[in-house]
Image (cartoon, grey):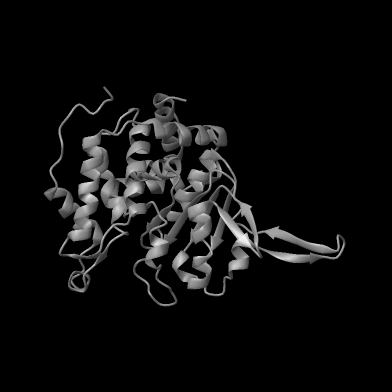
Amino acid sequence: MDNTIIEATAKTINTNIQKVIIGKSNVIDLLITSIIAGGHVLIEDVPGTGKTVLAKSLAKSIDVNFKRIQFTPDLLPSDLIGINYYNQKEKEFTFRKGPIFTNILLADEINRATPRTQSSLLEAMEEHQISVDGHTYALDEPFFVIATENPIENQGTFPLPEAQLDRFMMKINMGYPTLEESKQLFKRFIMDNPLEKIEAVCNIKEILAAKNEYKKVYVHDEIQSYILNIIEDTRNNEDILMGVSPRGALSLLKCCQAYAAIQGRNYVIPEDAKYLCPYVLNHRIILKDTLSIRGVSGFSVINNILDKIKVPTEDWSMK
């Protein structure tokens, strides 16, 4: 599979999802970029903006297993990963797999679960495996978590710790539709639900092939330095209490490669990094209290850093 095939696959998935979701082509591309790059996505937005519908549309567009878990305060880790139970017929303990054993997992309202349950996702998201009673079980590939949370309502929620946030490759927002998009939404949903009619346009083999092929996308030394300069600024910025981790830097690099691939290029350009930085880095920094009180977002701070860092100019294709 070359990058033109990856581009065609991504466009086919994007077009298919837009049979349900209206006007969010860029958000869909970010999801596709993340799944190819082997990461996970946190979607933070107010209720009713289409977070769950987007996740279901992606899962139905790819012929993979999909499971949705509604996170609640009484959800236990065993409800997510599974349990060992005594099988009287076999006279031995048997492991019953939980819903985490799937390809695409929708963790709906993840911040409503307790920290103990949230932490049960850490090993799965990072190492694509889980450990139960001394035994390790590999998860199916691809394994892609789409988590949602409501940024407004705080009652009955447990904010995600930094270690959990760092496991998400991107944090994105859906946003409200425009007036014209809302009119199209009415027309599309007034008679039936298009989500029920959407069919798969891609299979697991194509996604796994893309996950291997994107790694061949060339990243010029100057672009690597550009990315590292951005990361370094987050660690020395007067507005930032804690900067981006090495995991975050690698996530940005991988996202740039995957995004270039779905654009049909076999090399990364500076605009890839500049576009992706706010989505990949905004949740990986901790702002100083003075900014948080004023309501300044990590997204805007990252954009301010991008405005300061000199963008390199060069022939970015492999020589």
Q: Is 118 placed above or below 27 here?
A: below
Image x and y of residue 126, in percent: 48, 54
**Residue 274 visible somewhere in the drawing:** no
Image x and y of residue 224, in percent: 26, 40
Image x and y of residue 221, in percent: 24, 35
For residue 106, side relative to residue 228 (left or right): right
Q: Is 318 placed above or below 198 here?
A: above
Q: Nearer the viewer, residue 262 or 83?
A: 83
Q: Name the residue rendered at 18%, 69% in the picture.
A: 291
Q: Could you tell me which quadrant the C terminus lies in?
A: top left
Q: Quadrant of residue 299?
A: bottom left
Q: How many marks?
A: 0
Image x and y of residue 90, in percent: 86, 60
Q: Quadrant of residue 20?
A: top left
Q: Name the residue rendered at 33%, 43% in the picture.
A: 253
Q: Is 309 placed above or below 283 here?
A: above
**Residue 64 visible somewhere in the drawing:** yes
Q: Nearer the viewer, residue 265 or 22?
A: 265
Q: Name the residue rendered at 21%, 70% in the picture.
A: 288
Q: Is 297 placed above or below 6 here?
A: below
Q: Name the residue rendered at 29%, 34% in the picture.
A: 219
